[in-house]
Amino acid sequence: MHLFKLFAAAALTMTFATNSSAVPTVTGDPIIVKHIGSMDWPGDKNGVVVPFLTQGDANALNDLHGEASCDVIISTPGNYHMALQDLMHGRADLGHASLVDQIRAQYNLTVCWTTSPPINEEQIPAEVVQFGNLRIVGKPVLAMGPGGKMNNLVNKNLVDATTVKNFLRNRGNAILVRADDDNEITGICDLAEDDVRLVTPRPPARPGEPKDVAAEAGSFGNFSGTVYNVINDNTDLECHDDAEAIFNSFFSQDLAELDLRGLDNAFNHKKFLKVYKRDDVKWVASSRIMHRDVPYALCNDYADAGVIFYHQAKYLKREAAKFSCDLEIIPMGGTAENPMPVAGNRVGTLKIAKVNGTFSNEVKLAADIIYDAMTTAGGVWETILIEHGMVFPQ
């Protein structure tokens, strides 16, 4: 097996560097991760609204019907949910009280937030989001997202451009594998092996296909691009000359050439699982929410490796162990404990902004508590981020 080579300290920077070569075009399609024996029950007859965040095994509130709301609604991507939970619900060991409790006590307001793929472009104007048969009605007062998404919100006048600030920087991406996987993946060059199956977020819809607002197009582009760029940009790697071939071995997969009949019945476990274990399957993808489907695919042997945010890999390794699924982090630069992303391993920043609209003075003040906590250097938010494998942007 190829080991990921050590790089000079000067190359181990927290920036995104890449050669001028463009990432190859994705020409294939993945097998979508399906959960064994999952039952997609029909929803209420009044249909669904957009954004709709239900999938077979998650957000399926089948037995709670109607509409509900919160006073302070936050629309945010979910990849840093573990840190956001600590901030919002408090950390006694850090001397940090719950912001939710503080807002309730000070303003008698409730707070809720989404932790899905970014949906704020749809959620803000629609003023609703649906989980199963329950609709959460109300306009978000704060919105978070990556730079491209935030630019869209600004251009559509959905947020106040003067309030846009960076509040989180990740530490690049890592490869996540099963510790007991037979392929013994120890570095990115091992993805070149013929029998390695890769799991990614769901790619964007192709031209003419219906758009899924919860598809994880940005994360897919990030992770698939990382596979190519890290190999292409680091000449010390043994597989450097094979960047395009390795990329295409996954992302040119033709579903028409695969026997997928076992996927028709998720209750016939033997035939169902056999599809994912076929020798010619190379690429599977999340149905909707990657921080659930990527570990599911790895732990259930749908895939051998997944490229994912380092902080998510750290969280998933810890939590999956509680289910007797031992995952291992393969860094792309640095170590599993202290990643230092090499050239081509993208480091991303998330931004926060206040939503334009009419809100009560109490709601604005409550939102300010959260906004200020997430944008102030040297505070508890910075400590929480470091603990979960992220950093506060300087």
Image: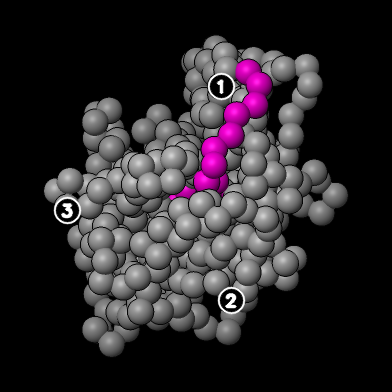
Seen at 40% across and 29% down, the residue is 300
Q: Secondary structure at mark 3?
A: helix
Question: What residue is rendered at 74% in x and 29% in y?
Answer: 48
Question: Of helix, strand and loop, which one carries label 1?
Answer: loop
For the N terminus, which image quadrant? Answer: bottom left
Q: Would you name the residue on which mark 1 appears? A: 61
Residue plotted at (58% across, 40% down):
288
Magenta-colored span: 65-79
Does the CB distance between marks 3 and 1 fall below 8 Å? no
Q: Position of residue 25 (x, y in %)?
A: 68, 64
Spatial CA distance of label 1 from label 2 is 37 Å
Q: Amino acid at mark 1?
A: Leu
Instruction: Say whether disc 1 or disc 2 marks the residue closer to the N-terminus.
Output: 1
Compared across the picture, whether 107 is left or right of 30 comes to left
Q: Amino acid at mark 3?
A: Leu
Residue at 82% x, 54% y: name it.
207
**Front one among 86 and 193:** 86
Query: Does the magenta run of residues contain 141?
Result: no
Name, please, the residue furthest toward the right.
208
Type of amino acid under label 2: Thr
Q: Position of residue 330 (x, y in %)?
A: 30, 56
Along the viewing direction, whichever of 236 and 336 lies nearer the viewer: 336
Left or right position of 204 against 299: right
Q: Would you name the residue on which mark 2 appears?
A: 162
Q: Which residue is nearer to you in this view: 379 or 118?
A: 379
- Residue 161: image quadrant is bottom right
The residue that label 3 is drawn on is 94
